[in-house]
Image (cartoon, rainbow, N blue to C red):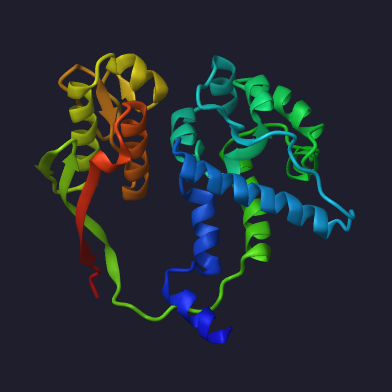
Amino acid sequence: METLRKIIVTKNYPTDSRVRREVLSEQVYDKRSQTTNKIVLILESINRHLSTKAHSGGYTVLDNNGTIEHIMPQTLSFEWKEQLGIGWEETYTDYLHTFGNLTLVTQEWNSALSNSSFEAKKIKLIDHALRLNSEYFAQDISIWNSDAIRTRGEFLTKAILELWPELGTPPMVQKTAGTIPKTLMIMSQSFEVFSWRDVLFITARTISELVDDFDNRVVNQMPSYFSRQKFQGACRQLPNGWWLFMNFSAASIKNLCRNLISYAGIDEDEWRVEVEEALASS
């Protein structure tokens, strides 16, 4: 068992500190079924764990297949923008697909909750069968913003680490400063790139040139990332006139590109980035 533990540690099994960091900040959700199934499994496990801790003698399950509900919805109404306040675009961009903003319901509930206000969603979630929802949202939560999402992320992180604690300290490796993209390959085309922003721009540009009805299939699904007016901050203009917001981390850009190709109906195997390690300065 100890030998197996040591082997697993060398296979990038995350440390507790990494889990704490990434649960709060990583955009974990996308439309791929494999990713969705993993999130459903994690949330189902947390629900069962919460029931065990409460010594309730059992746990509830959904009466149909689980789906992922975004508490702050993927399409923001005027009411949601008002509640999020100044900087709502940043909250939307940074927290929409993070664990703290996701919960588990059936498709029927997902459709009923839809783009409802937080107040309306909270009332329904308090009555939900899963302890994951009913207990958490019974708390005094008056507004759903970045702080609330991070707080729930911390709550989920605690449960995740109780279920799957770190197995040990991974072996030391040469420090790097991340990866530098060198070549982007999309739909049998190859492009030399020098930054992750190049990757995002060329991905969006190529899709805009290949996909019919770009506005409905892509822009309407990602309204905070495109504008007919130039954004304040880092942005680039596509040949079709849309401005693309560019001020994202490398990890966020990878997720954005996967969403772009998904909305465009392009197989994920048709998009790939070749990278090289960037050594950290001493």
Foreground pick, 182 / 122: 182
Query: Visible in this render: residue 151?
Result: no
Residue in view at x 73 percent, y 44 percent: 132
- Rendered position, 241 above or below 20: above
Q: Is residue 5 left or right of residue 140?
A: left
Residue in view at x 14 percent, y 38 percent: 188
Query: Visible in this render: residue 218?
Result: yes
Q: Quadrant of residue 276?
A: bottom left
Q: Is residue 107 left or right of residue 179?
A: right
Foreground pick, 213 / 265: 265
Outermost residue, front direction?
64
* Picture coordinates of residue 181, whole percent (x, y): 19, 52
Foreground pick, 93 / 30: 30
Residue in view at x 70 percent, y 26 percent: 121
Q: Quadrant of residue 264?
A: top left
In what quadrant of the picture does the C terminus appear? bottom left
* Picture coordinates of residue 86, whole percent (x, y): 50, 27
